[in-house]
């Protein structure tokens, strides 16, 4: 009997090893093991000797890469018998039922896991293989595959591909790029920066344009990768064929999986994931609107909200959202502590340190929940309030200091919400002038950040912000504490670049006129002395082109997102010289294509194009739509 027992254990160990290489079986957090999958139960239920017919399996949602390191990168795909997401109870013994949404019934499916091979190479033919492996996936993790490709060289372009084991069923070919070693000299890096992609409001054309131009090395996403609303609650997608599924407010694990999967049907989003490594962080809508440590705008751990949300508690809803995000996004499992942590940093040679914050979920004090705006206004400068919690704050300040001490040329900070003070009352008619869901609601936390930068003489700081669905460019200024000259920029400690949404509409709505948008930004720029430029009209993105001597930010606007197209306008270009800690004057060279410039003029181009939704002034890149 002993040899038989030994053989059985050895077999299980081999199978388990193949499962454990798929990172998605692990919990997003070492301190939340319940979020992970019991591989013992998976192995017990699945029979590896029973195999799938490769022709019945499909790479349903493309491929992706992310969280690049000098010697490794995360690779992702989904290989499944159905494009739909599994809706079954994955913990049952025996077989797992598969829900067929066409017939609206559960059907028994095979107990066989799906065997997947991957390889990564320096050539498109995948002959010079740097790393490869074999992993399993199953319905337990929505048939997703996430692996860490290792043994790679720094700052090198790689190509990768998946295939169903021992078959010709292969995924698309992906391209990715590792980061340089922290002590490597790097002459230039390009980063595309995005936020707020809302499916029913339009097509994600912004994701595809850097692919068509091949203009960047990496993609940074500052959050709101998805929205949790039902169709019609925020965006109405029937007229353009963009109804988010499931067509309801989402709460369950299935709901969040299905919503991300729906977004991943957008061809430009697929193209961006396929061609660039992503470094994403979540904002609030990956879970729910205006989230904070203990709840969200409509989730307050009350009996009423519990009933309204179908019996899903605040914590369970967050766990469902985080589990789905971890399964579908090409991110690593960070070394966790007492909470769900996504904040992390990347050293890209001597050129820059990219510091990605979580100013929403980790340990944020209560925010503006719409019914308590006056209260949050009253406590907005309370010293005990934190945008990120004391543990993350301490880490953040250490990151800034260590980056400066190691001699990195730039510190790039990814923050979900706008960092600079923005008095919006003159433009939007707000009774309370500031956005208390952004850093304006946590003024002491912002002051502590400024104090750390000024007191430690840490310069060359570039803050990146999303969330607001508008473009803002400001000098970073500790107002009321440091003297600042808007004309010259003297007194600034850095620059903030805040980007518009991929599709989410500006605060005035999706159909704002250009004249109204211009007037609003004119008031905003006049009311905020550190704000140098703003545009709320265009959806779009911006690119950072970073060298040791300067950072150039290029803003692009999309004439229309109600059709899939490759049109974009060069809205404005900004430069920050090393050591200046302010925008170059004249700001944007004195001229922008849209919005309002504090000192300068707005001049439209003469080029026009008929987009099918009216004639727009555009600079048209003659690029093939992928």
Image: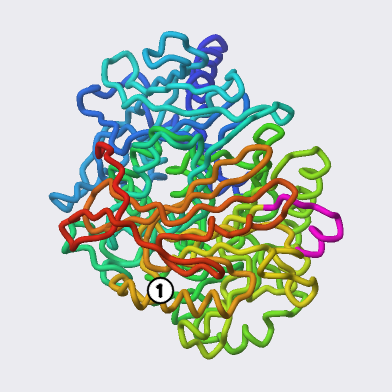
| x then y, percent, for residue 234 | 33, 70
Say if the magenta span includes residue 451. yes
Q: Is residue 620 above or below residue 244?
A: above
| 499 on left or right of 587 | left
Task: Residue at 26%, 71% (x, y): give it.
Answer: 232
Task: Residue at 56%, 73% (x, y): give it.
Answer: 437
Q: Residue furthest right?
A: 455
Q: In terms of image quadrants, where is residue 178?
A: top right
| x then y, percent, for residue 141 | 41, 40
Task: Residue at 68%, 42% (x, y): give it.
Answer: 353
| 620 on left or right of 482 | left
Residue tagged 1: 518
Say if the magenta span includes residue 417. no
Q: Is residue 137 above or below residue 312?
A: above
| x then y, percent, for residue 222 | 52, 54
In the image, the segment drawn in magenta is 450-461
């Amino acid at each position: 009997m002993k040899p038989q027992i030994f053989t059985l254990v050895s077999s299980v160990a081999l199978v388990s090893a193949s499962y454990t290489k798929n990172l998605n079986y692990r919990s997003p957090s070492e301190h939340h093991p319940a979020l992970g999958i019991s591989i013992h139960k998976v192995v017990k239920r699945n029979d590896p000797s029973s195999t799938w017919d490769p022709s019945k399996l499909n790479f349903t949602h493309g491929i992706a890469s992310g969280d690049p390191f000098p010697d490794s990168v995360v690779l992702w795909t989904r290989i499944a018998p159905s494009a739909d997401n599994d809706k079954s109870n994955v913990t049952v013994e025996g077989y797992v039922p598969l829900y067929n949404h066409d017939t609206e019934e559960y059907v028994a499916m095979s107990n066989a896991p799906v065997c997947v091979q991957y390889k990564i190479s320096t050539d498109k033919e995948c002959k010079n293989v740097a790393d490869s492996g074999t992993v399993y996936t199953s319905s337990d993790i929505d048939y997703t595959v996430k692996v860490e490709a290792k043994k790679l060289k720094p700052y090198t372009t790689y190509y990768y591909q998946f295939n169903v084991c021992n078959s010709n069923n292969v995924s698309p070919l992906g391209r990715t790029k590792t980061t340089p070693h922290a002590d490597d000299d790097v002459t230039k890096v390009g980063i595309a920066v995005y936020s707020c992609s809302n499916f029913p409001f339009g097509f994600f054309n912004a994701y595809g344009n850097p692919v068509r131009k091949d203009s960047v090395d990496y993609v940074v996403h500052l959050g709101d990768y998805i929205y949790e609303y039902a169709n019609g609650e925020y965006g109405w997608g029937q007229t353009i064929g963009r109804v988010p599924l499931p067509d309801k407010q989402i709460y369950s694990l299935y709901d969040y999986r299905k919503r991300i999967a729906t977004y991943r049907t957008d061809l430009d989003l697929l193209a961006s994931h396929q061609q660039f490594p992503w470094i994403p962080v979540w904002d609030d809508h990956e879970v729910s609107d205006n989230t904070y440590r203990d709840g969200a705008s409509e989730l307050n751990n009350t009996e009423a909200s519990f009933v309204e949300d179908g019996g899903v508690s605040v914590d369970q809803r967050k766990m469902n959202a985080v589990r789905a995000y971890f399964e579908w996004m090409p991110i690593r499992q960070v070394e966790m502590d007492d909470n769900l942590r996504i904040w992390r940093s990347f050293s890209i040679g001597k050129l820059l340190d990219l510091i990605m914050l979580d100013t929403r979920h980790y340990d944020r004090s209560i925010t503006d929940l719409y019914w308590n705006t006056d209260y949050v206004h009253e406590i907005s400068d309370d010293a005990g309030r934190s945008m990120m919690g004391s543990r993350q704050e301490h880490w953040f300040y250490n990151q800034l200091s260590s980056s400066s001490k190691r001699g990195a040329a730039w510190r790039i900070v990814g923050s979900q919400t706008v960092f600079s003070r923005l008095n919006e009352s003159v433009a939007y008619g707000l009774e309370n002038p500031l956005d208390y869901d952004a850093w304006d609601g946590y003024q002491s936390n912002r002051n502590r950040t400024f104090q750390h930068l000024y007191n430690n003489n840490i310069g060359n700081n570039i803050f990146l912000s999303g969330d607001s669905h508008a473009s803002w460019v400001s000098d970073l200024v500790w107002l009321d504490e440091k003297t600042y000259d808007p004309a010259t920029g003297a007194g600034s400690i850095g620059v903030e670049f805040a980007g518009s949404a991929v599709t989410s509409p500006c605060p005035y709505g999706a159909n704002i006129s250009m004249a109204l948008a211009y007037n609003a930004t004119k008031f905003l720029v006049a009311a905020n002395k550190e704000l140098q430029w703003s545009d709320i009209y265009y959806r779009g993105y911006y690119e950072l082109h970073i060298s040791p001597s300067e950072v150039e930010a290029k803003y692009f606007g999309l004439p229309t997102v109600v059709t899939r197209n490759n049109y974009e306008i060069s809205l404005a270009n900004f430069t920050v010289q090393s050591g200046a800690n302010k925008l170059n004057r004249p700001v944007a060279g004195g001229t922008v294509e849209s919005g309002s410039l504090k000192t300068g003029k707005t001049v439209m181009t003469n080029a026009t194009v008929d987009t099918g939704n009216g004639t727009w002034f555009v600079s048209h890149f003659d690029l093939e739509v992928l």
